[in-house]
Image (cartoon, rainbow, N blue to C red):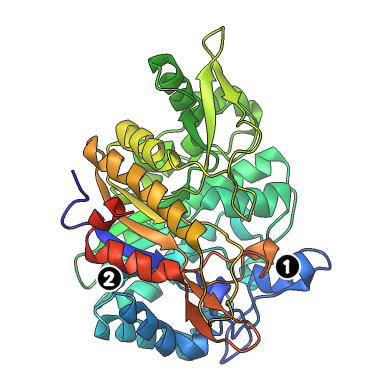
């Protein structure tokens, strides 16, 4: 079996990571604009002030996407670019940018997939309590309505959030990402609750105000994707249990996020593990979170192995010395793109999209003027073969978005990591498609059949 004939192939990027123009044309500040000014917060003091300058170079970038035969592009909107205070007065120049970008994509026959929030939270709303404020779901609903009323005559594919457990967990529990805080567990879980309410209100708003029939989803990361160390049934069950149980008191568990929005309830292990730290749940909250979704987006980069221990409980199995790693020091685990979609689809029965997958590689422009990245080609081929296997086993996988179209600002790692299919010289902003970009073009053109060519 190959990929389904209507399979969606694309690339992904995020506003703060590529747009730049951080202070241009009325844009408000985000928590990342603030965080990048904190000494030591971002590698080498890098910021997203300029990034890939996509705000001014979007036409060039869309032309590149067209040249590479990309059918779909997953982008995000900068909330403070269109609402500088997060709510209230609208920045028309910011809205105009997204109008032009969407029109440019459609003129190139590239379908836009719009993520409403990819981490650049408005600084003014943060100063009002951010995700701890019980009004935050309505703030997000108001922002969603603005974007849907503006773009839904042309945009038919929406995602509410990108990786909520990362922007809550790394931003507010560990403090490694913006806004760089470390709250106690009760506050962190209350934020999680408000984010899920925001997601639900966002979905309701898209359904109510969209001018065209829309597909709506939410993007989560399966984190350190749990997968079995062997194909023994007991190890498969151990990996599944490890993925969906809540065994430690933090906000990084898959089921903490997916059970409320896809099943309408918190998992039992949330109550037993979190105890008194559980958030305040008002009547109707879980129903608001649990809105019908057309797909669930999964961002999967690597996995961890689990096996059944002597007591039958899941035990993490370390990789052997010398196991392949990316430049980011993430283990290369192609099977993660089989087990992640399989486990999620079996538990929730909702179609899956891989909304991010890729690797950081040590890329530079060679003396021949090209960028040779055979490791990325090998990596993507291995992972896509595993995703195809998931399709063959009956998992309803609707699409795959490679991360990322451009090398870009990799959050707290600054410009150290290069994830792009296209190399960016940050001093000159010159774009150079890598070998992997042309390879991916062949994969798309053949709907995956070229994976079998060595």
* Percent position of residue 256, x then y: 50, 37
Residue at image location 26% in from the left, 39% down from the top: 395
Relative to 141, residue 301 above or below:
above
Q: Which residue is mark 2?
A: 71
Of residues 135 and 8, the one nearer the viewer is: 8
Q: How would you rate the neighbour count of disc 1 (Cα within 10 Å): few for under 14, some for 14-19, many for 20 or more?
A: many
Q: Which residue is mark 1?
A: 35
Q: Secondary structure at mark 1?
A: helix
Relative to 207, residue 408 above or below:
below
Q: How would you rate the neighbour count of disc 2 (Cα within 10 Å): few for under 14, some for 14-19, many for 20 or more?
A: some
Q: Is residue 30 left or right of residue 397?
A: right
Which image quarter: residue 426? bottom right
Of residues 6 and 244, the one nearer the viewer is: 6
Cα separation, mark 1 vs mark 2, equals 35 Å
Residue at image location 56% in from the left, 13% down from the top: 309
Q: Are marks 1 and 2 in contact (CB under 8 Å)?
A: no
Disc number placed over residue 379 in the picture, else none: none
* Percent position of residue 323, x then y: 60, 38
Quadrant housing the N terminus: top left
Residue at image location 49% in from the left, 41% down from the top: 333
Relative to 321, residue 196 above or below:
below
Which image quarter: residue 231? top left
Residue 101 visible? The answer is: yes
Q: Is residue 30 left or right of residue 141?
A: right
Q: Secondary structure at mark 2?
A: loop
Of residues 200 and 322, the one nearer the viewer is: 322
Q: Which numbered disc, 1 or 2, marks the residue that appears first in the sequence?
A: 1
Residue at image location 31% in from the left, 37% down from the top: 345
């Amino acid at each position: 079996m190959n990929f389904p004939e209507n399979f969606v192939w694309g690339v992904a990027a995020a506003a703060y990571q590529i747009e730049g123009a951080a202070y241009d044309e009325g844009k408000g500040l985000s928590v990342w604009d603030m965080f990048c000014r904190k000494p030591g917060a971002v590698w080498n003091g890098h910021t997203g002030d300029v990034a890939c300058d996509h705000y001014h170079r979007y036409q060039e970038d869309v032309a590149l996407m067209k040249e590479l035969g990309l059918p779909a592009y997953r982008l995000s909107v900068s909330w403070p670019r269109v609402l500088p205070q997060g709510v209230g007065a609208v920045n028309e120049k910011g809205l105009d940018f997204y109008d032009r970008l969407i029109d440019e994509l459609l003129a190139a026959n590239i379908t836009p997939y719009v993520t409403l929030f990819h981490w650049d939270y408005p600084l003014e709303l943060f100063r009002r309590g951010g995700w701890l404020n019980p009004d935050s779901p309505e703030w997000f609903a108001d922002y969603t309505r603005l974007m849907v009323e503006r773009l839904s005559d042309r945009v038919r594919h929406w995602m509410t959030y990108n990786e909520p457990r990362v922007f809550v967990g790394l931003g507010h529990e560990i403090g490694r990402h913006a806004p760089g805080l470390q709250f106690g567990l009760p506050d962190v879980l209350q934020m999680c609750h408000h984010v899920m309410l925001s997601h639900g209100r966002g979905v309701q708003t898209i359904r109510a105000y969209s001018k065209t029939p829309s597909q709506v989803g939410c993007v989560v990361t399966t984190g350190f994707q749990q997968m079995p160390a062997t194909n023994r049934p007991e190890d498969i069950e151990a990996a599944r249990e490890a993925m969906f149980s809540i065994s430690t008191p933090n906000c990084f568990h898959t089921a903490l996020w997916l059970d409320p929005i896809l099943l309408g309830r918190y998992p039992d292990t949330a109550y037993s593990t979190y105890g008194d730290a559980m958030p305040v749940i008002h009547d109707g909250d879980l129903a608001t979170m649990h809105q019908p979704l057309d797909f669930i987006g999964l961002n999967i980069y690597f996995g961890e192995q689990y096996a059944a221990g002597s007591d039958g409980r899941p035990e993490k199995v370390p990789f052997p010395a010398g196991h392949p790693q990316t430049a980011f020091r993430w283990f290369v685990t192609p099977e993660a793109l089989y087990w992640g979609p399989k486990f999620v689809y079996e538990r929730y029965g909702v179609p899956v999209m891989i909304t991010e997958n890729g690797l950081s590689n040590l890329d530079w422009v060679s003396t021949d003027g090209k960028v040779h990245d055979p490791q990325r080609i090998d990596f993507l081929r291995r992972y896509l073969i595993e995703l195809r296997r998931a399709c063959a086993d009956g998992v309803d996988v609707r699409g795959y978005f490679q991360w990322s179209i451009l090398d870009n600002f990799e959050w707290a790692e600054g410009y150290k990591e290069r994830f792009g299919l296209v190399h960016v010289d940050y001093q000159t902003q010159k774009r150079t498609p890598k070998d992997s970009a042309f390879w991916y073009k062949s994969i798309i053109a053949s709907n995956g059949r070229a994976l079998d060519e060595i």
